Image (cartoon, rainbow, N blue to C red):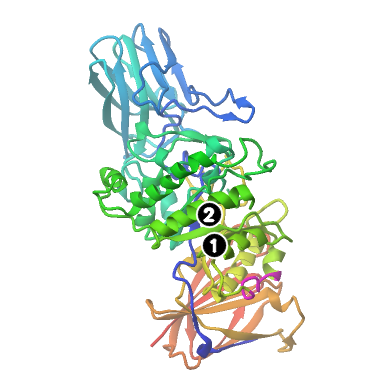
């Protein structure tokens, strides 16, 4: 094969092309990226579904009382805050019993590490009290890994804090709180964080997971969903204002994926994470309608329809307030709240998504238009991303695009979960796009095989399609694989990019494709042509075979490099000559990274090596492989 460039036809690529989409699905937030170790710390678990109430999800979830001469009950008479109504009351006749939290599949603890405990206590009888706080490992009876005593006084809610230092490792410890004084003690917001969160942030993120995400080098983060953003009924729409401010004042809610959202990882924390990893924040808010706003919801449940028209002004204002929260100066109402949370500088929000994969109906259009017009008028500096609606193999996005064209929406969010074959056969999907219309954000995509594995076949289909996205980097502004995270044994959707449990993080082969694109992005696309030959040097020109080999060559001004990406989805190696004449490359050593394996391989990993290059060189594309060659320019 040979690749010949046409540098005179070079065109710019979006600076944001590769990003991530974070949704609280598969325990991605609570029990996942959010570093809180205590499950149901606020006693607010209450999962009600369309049929009413699920008895397994209640205020007692994850809590038990160990020992005698005490009782444990839930009360709502005098809460810390009306948004956080439930709290525990321990009635201790004689000290000895303890309230125990089992964490999310246990509490992982590392020897020598420090853990920050905080809680609110109210000694309902008596004036002062003490609680013995311990981390115990049930693996060995009464094996105490860490302990401290906290003292509090007065019969009103007071916050207490302490640091526990672990003296041993444990994969599955429990947190025990044992009152040392008889009487009635109310407890709430019982929280335990590792001190070593990502970037050492308070109320922060799990360091190893956040780091693996940061290692993709994403240019943007879309959050908080997905379906989570629009909810499965009017009462389940994600309201950003419920997720900011002191933790004890936030409003937790049912997660439509079948568990609970504490709102501890809320809008402030999302913005801060984006800043910490140098990514643009791309929040998505509901377009005034919940999931599948009319007709029966394929995902089930919830009240259908849209936000009533007489409540829409208030809803639109909420969205304008979000922009002020992110960008307003500290003298604005919402900018002041951001400053109070510890971030007086703005978060420099530039994009906002309105709607997620909604059915495009009149109910939707009316509400979307109201929001779009208001944001455009008040904040012309913000790029609004509309939704193209649901996509299934064989359909198109006609209605979503009709609205986008009518309103001149600057960018439109498309989603597709399709077979590897679809990706291979539709590499020209964006080549055909009308460049005068909205830009595209491919907000969710993944190659799905029957049984939904993550393997070399799906990873290479995605890598191959990403060459087409780079080629169309003038119209496709952003792209993000979905979903990002999944906790083992708590997964509602497969495949996902990164699996994890309490102690380890397990990136898939597909992750490495994302990472190779994220760390090898460019600002200019250099078009070229490829002709393929087989091992005997005979030209391959069979349609459909040729389409299983794809390439993309980009220039990155910042690192002064030319980056060549080559995907071979054929079962045989392909030899290719590459002609970089006229580009001004520095002859010498390039870096070559190859991800290769059998189509069903799940554990292939990229191999990096030095690679000698000159203006014209030959390279082999192994069977089922993704190769990235980074060449320095003079
Ligand atoms: O990524 C999982 C789900 O797929 C998202 O929540 C939704 O937008 C899509 O249907």
Name the residue rendered at 41%, 38% in the picture: 242
The image quarter containing residue 176 is: top left
Foreground residue among 566 and 254:
254
Image height check: is 356 above or below 143? below
- At which x and y percent is residue 211? 41, 54
Image height check: is 322 above or below 250? below
Name the residue rendered at 35%, 55% in the picture: 276
Viewer can see residue 255: no
- At which x and y percent is residue 247? 35, 35
Residue located beneath label 1 in the image: 407
Name the residue rendered at 46%, 41% in the picture: 239
Left or right: residue 303 compared with residue 381: right
Foreground residue among 289 and 484:
289
The image quarter containing residue 78 is: top left
Secondary structure under tag 1 reads helix
Please name the predominant secondary structure of the magenta segment in the image. loop
Foreground residue among 231 and 46:
231
Left or right: residue 590 compared with residue 428: left
Image height check: is 495 above or below 580? above
- At which x and y percent is residue 605? 55, 63
Q: Quadrant of the C terminus?
A: bottom left
Q: Quadrant of the N terminus?
A: bottom right
- At which x and y percent is residue 115? 32, 36
Q: Distance between the Cα atoms at labels 2 and 1?
A: 8 Å
Residue located beneath label 2 in the image: 369
């Amino acid at each position: 094969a040979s690749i010949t460039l046409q540098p005179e036809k070079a065109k710019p690529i979006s600076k944001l092309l590769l990003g991530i989409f974070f949704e609280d699905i598969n325990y991605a937030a609570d029990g996942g990226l959010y570093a809180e170790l205590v499950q149901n710390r606020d006693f607010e678990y209450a999962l009600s579904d369309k049929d009413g109430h699920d008895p397994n999800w209640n205020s007692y979830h994850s809590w038990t009382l160990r020992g005698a001469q005490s009782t444990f009950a839930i009360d709502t008479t005098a809460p810390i805050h009306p948004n956080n109504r439930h709290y525990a009351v321990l009635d201790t006749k004689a000290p000895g019993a303890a309230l125990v939290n089992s964490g999310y599949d246990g509490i992982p603890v590392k020897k020598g590490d420090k853990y920050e405990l905080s809680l609110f206590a109210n000694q309902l009888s008596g004036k002062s009290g003490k609680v013995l706080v311990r981390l115990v490992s049930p693996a060995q009876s009464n094996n105490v890994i860490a302990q401290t005593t906290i003292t509090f006084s007065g019969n009103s809610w007071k916050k207490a804090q302490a640091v526990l230092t672990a003296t041993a490792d444990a994969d599955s410890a429990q947190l025990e709180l044992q009152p040392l004084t008889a009487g009635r003690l109310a407890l709430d917001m019982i929280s335990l964080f590792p001190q070593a969160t990502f970037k050492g942030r308070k109320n922060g993120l799990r360091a190893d997971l956040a780091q693996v995400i940061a290692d993709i080098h994403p240019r943007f983060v879309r959050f908080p969903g997905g379906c989570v953003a629009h909810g499965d009924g009017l009462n389940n729409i994600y309201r950003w204002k419920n997720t900011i401010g002191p933790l004890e004042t936030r409003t937790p809610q049912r997660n439509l994926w079948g568990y609970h959202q504490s709102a501890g990882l809320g809008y402030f924390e999302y913005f801060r994470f984006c800043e910490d990893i140098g990514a643009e924040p791309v929040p998505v808010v509901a377009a005034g309608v919940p999931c599948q706003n009319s007709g029966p919801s394929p995902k089930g449940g919830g009240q259908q329809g849209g936000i009533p028209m007489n409540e829409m002004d208030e809803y639109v204002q909420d969205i304008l307030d979000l922009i002020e929260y992110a960008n307003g100066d500290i003298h604005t109402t919402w900018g002041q709240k951001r400053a109070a949370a510890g971030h007086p500088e703005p978060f420099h929000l530039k994009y906002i998504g309105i709607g997620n994969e909604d059915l495009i109906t009149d109910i939707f259009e009316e509400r979307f238009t109201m929001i779009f017009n208001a944001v455009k008028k008040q904040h012309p500096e913000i790029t609004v991303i509309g939704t193209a609606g649901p996509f299934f193999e064989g359909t198109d996005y006609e209605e979503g695009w009709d609205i986008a064209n009518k309103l001149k929406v600057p960018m439109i969010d498309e989603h597709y979960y399709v077979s590897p074959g679809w990706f291979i056969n539709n590499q020209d999907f964006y080549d055909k796009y009308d460049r005068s219309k909205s830009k595209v954000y491919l907000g969710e995509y993944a190659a799905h095989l029957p049984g939904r594995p993550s393997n070399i076949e799906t990873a290479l289909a995605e890598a191959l399609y990403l060459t087409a996205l780079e080629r169309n980097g003038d119209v496709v502004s952003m792209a993000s694989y979905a979903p990002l995270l999944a906790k083992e044994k708590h997964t509602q959707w497969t495949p996902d990019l990164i699996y994890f449990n309490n102690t380890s993080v397990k990136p898939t082969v597909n992750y490495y494709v994302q990472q190779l694109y994220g760390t090898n992005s460019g600002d200019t696309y250099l078009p070229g042509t490829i002709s393929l030959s087989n091992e005997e040097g005979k030209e391959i020109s069979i349609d459909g075979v040729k389409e299983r080999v794809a390439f993309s060559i980009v220039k990155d001004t910042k690192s002064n490099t030319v980056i060549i990406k080559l995907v071979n989805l054929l079962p045989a190696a392909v030899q290719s000559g590459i002609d970089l004449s006229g580009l001004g490359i520095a002859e010498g050593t390039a870096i070559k990274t190859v991800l290769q394996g059998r189509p069903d391989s799940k554990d292939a990993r990229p191999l990096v090596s030095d690679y000698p290059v000159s203006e014209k060189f030959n390279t082999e594309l192994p069977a089922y492989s993704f190769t990235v060659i980074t060449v320095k320019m003079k």
